[in-house]
Structures are given as C-alpha cells and as structure tokens.
Image (cartoon, helix red, strand yellow):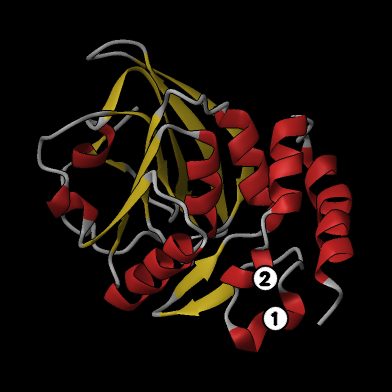
Amino acid sequence: MLDPKPARSNMVEQQIRPWHVLDAKILQLIEQVRREDFVPASYQQVAFADTQIPLGHGQFMLSPAFIGRILAELQIQPQNNVLEIGTGSGYLTFLLAKLARFVTSIELYQPLATQANSRLTNLKQRNFEIIHGNAVEVLRGGKSFDIVLITGSVQQLPKNIINQTKPGGKLFAVIGTKPIMQACIFTRINEETWSKNCLFETVIPPLEGIENVATFEF
C-alpha cells in the first residue's frame, strides 16, 4: 500500500479540490481522516483511488471526490442534526460527525452497521448513532433533521425519508437510473414547497429496501 499520508494529500489535491471543492475546512478534514481505516483489507491498494470500493452485500464506498463535493455543497453547520441513509463503511458517517452536532445513520445490513459502529467508537467519536434496519420502516414519525443524505440512488424520493427534513433543511439524493443519474440538493422551503438544485451527473448503486413505497415527485 502507498504511504497513506502523502496518498491522502494527493487524493485531496488531484481528485477533490479540482471538482469544485474549495472549502478549506472540508479539504483539511478529508486529508486528516484515515480513509484507509474504513476500506476493506482486500482493497487497501485502491483506498485513495477515484473509484467506488465494494464493501460486500452489494454495497459500495463512494469515491473521494463524490464525498468531498456533497459535503462542500451541503455546507453542514456545527448545530445541524444529520440523517444518513446507508452507513456503508462509516467513512462518510465519521466525516459528517466531525462537521455536525449529531448524526443518525441507518444501515440495512447488520454486518456493515456493526463494523461501522465499531470503527467510529474506536475513533472515540460520540455524536452519532447507527441503526440497523430499513430506513423506510424505521423512519415513521419521530424527530426531523437539518440535513438528510441518501447514499444510494433512487428513481423517486421516498416520502417517509423526505418528510424527515425540517423546513429550511436540505436533502441530498442521486435521482434516476442508468446510464444517467443526477446528484441533487433539495431544500425544503416550508411544509409543502421545495427547491431543487442538480449539481452533476453520476451513477451509483441503488438504495435497497424501498420497493413499492410511496414517493414524492418534484
């Protein structure tokens, strides 16, 4: 494996900064956090590559540039409460916890939820919870959030998930099907009104467990 410290620096300078990520706080955070600690052992050689990394169970770790861009666009504040749908490796969860007041992350697969919880706990992070379950079923009422991220693609936004966004809050999602999907930020103006800002085209694996659920169309 490459020497991780200069490899992380190169990842930031060659992949993330050129992709319209200029927020010094975000760049510094990504350079400092040991991404390699969240990557499966069999993929350590590509821990810093511009690629999605398999995690098992059909799930993938998103590319560094993708993660950097969405963090920069969401402009997460220290007082924000964040909801993440799809914990995966816990890498994005950890970055979110460094930026926000508290992070609630929901993971469909128990082994991934357990591994991510162990990683963050070992890193002595405290302002997070990882819940094992289907987000559409787990999110039935309860508290709402300033920021909501869906880490798998959806054809349309599930109502149960978007309803967790506070008025004035933001929701990130990748909308569409192969070969073209759009990464978008939706801002909830009030209970009934949203604005939509699509940032770039991409392709990521679909969010599982949302078949036949009620959706919201913009």
Q: Are marks 1 and 2 in contact (CB under 8 Å)?
A: yes
Q: Which residue type does callout 2 highlight?
A: Glu
Which of 205/63 is in front? 63
Give above or below for 204 relative to 26.
Answer: below
Pinpoint residue 19: horizontal percent, then vertical percent: 78, 41
Where does the N terminus fall, quadrant-wise?
Answer: bottom right
Q: Residue at x 83, y 63 (%)?
A: 5
Query: For numbered disc 1, what is the local secondary structure?
Result: helix
Where does the C terminus fall, quadrant-wise?
Answer: top left
Kindly identify which residue carries mark 2: 36
Kindly identify which residue carries mark 1: 44
Q: Residue at x 88, y 57 (%)?
A: 10
Residue 160 placement, left or right of 107:
left
Mark 2 Cα-neighbour bin, 10 Å: few <14, some 14–19, many ≥20: some
Residue 123 placement, left or right of 86:
right
Query: For numbered disc 2, what is the local secondary structure?
Result: helix
The answer to which quarter of the image holds residue 131 is bottom left
